[in-house]
Image: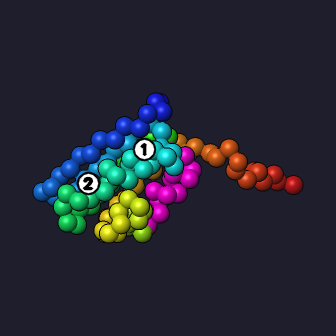
């Protein structure tokens, strides 16, 4: 898998759906580009249902938490979307979790 982030958007305006496919490595830095693409897709049509597909991406834990927050709140970060437009976003999560280097120690059975 490449470190470079690749984003493809597939839009079906007749059915008010769009899928944003991301491949590569999503970090807290590269996520900004992903947010911008999602914002642009969201602006294509009122009440567009967006699906973020990161199944084929390597997503750092903090970036995954940020994406999950956007899905839960249905809004993009204020710095990306100051108007806080509603964003109906769901996510197909990565197939393989990337673990943080500084995660809590594993529990050992006594």
Residue 37 lies left or right of residue 61; in this view the side is left
Q: Main secondary structure of the magenta part?
A: helix
Q: Residue at x 48, y 39 (%)?
A: 25
Q: Is residue 87 above or below residue 67?
A: below
Q: CA distance from mark 2 to mark 1?
A: 19 Å
Whole-percent x, y for residue 48 in the image? 23, 62
Local secondary structure at mark 1:
loop
The residue shown at (27%, 54%) is 40
Range of magenta residues: 59-72
Q: Quadrant of the C terminus?
A: bottom right
Along the line of sight, the residue nearer the viewer: 62 or 104: 62
| Quarter of the figure with residue 14 | bottom left
Residue 55: mark in rendering: 1
Q: As rendered, which of 9 and 77 lies closer to the eye?
A: 77
Q: State the mark number for residue 41.
A: 2
Within 10 Å of disc 2 (Cα), the crowding (few <14, some 14-19, many 20+) is: many
Specify the farthest residue to the left. Answer: 14
Is residue 69 within the magenta segment? Answer: yes
Q: Residue at x 27, y 45 (%)?
A: 9
- Residue at the spot 45% in from the left edge and 56% down from the top edge: 67
Q: Where does the image place residue 44, in percent across and percent down from the top left?
A: 19, 57
User: How many residues crowd around disc 1 within 10 Å: few (fewer than 14), some, or many (20 or more)?
Assistant: some
Picture colour scheme: rainbow
């Amino acid at each position: 898998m490449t470190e470079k982030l690749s984003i493809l958007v597939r839009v079906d305006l007749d059915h008010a759906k769009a899928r944003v496919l991301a491949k590569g490595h999503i970090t807290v830095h590269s996520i900004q580009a992903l947010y911008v693409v999602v914002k642009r897709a969201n602006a294509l049509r009122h009440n567009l249902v967006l699906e973020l597909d990161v199944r084929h991406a390597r997503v750092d834990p903090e970036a995954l938490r940020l994406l999950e927050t956007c899905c839960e709140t249905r809004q993009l970060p204020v710095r990306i979307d100051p108007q806080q437009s509603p964003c109906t976003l769901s996510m197909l999560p990565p197939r393989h979790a990337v673990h943080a280097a500084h995660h809590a120690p594993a529990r050992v059975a006594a």
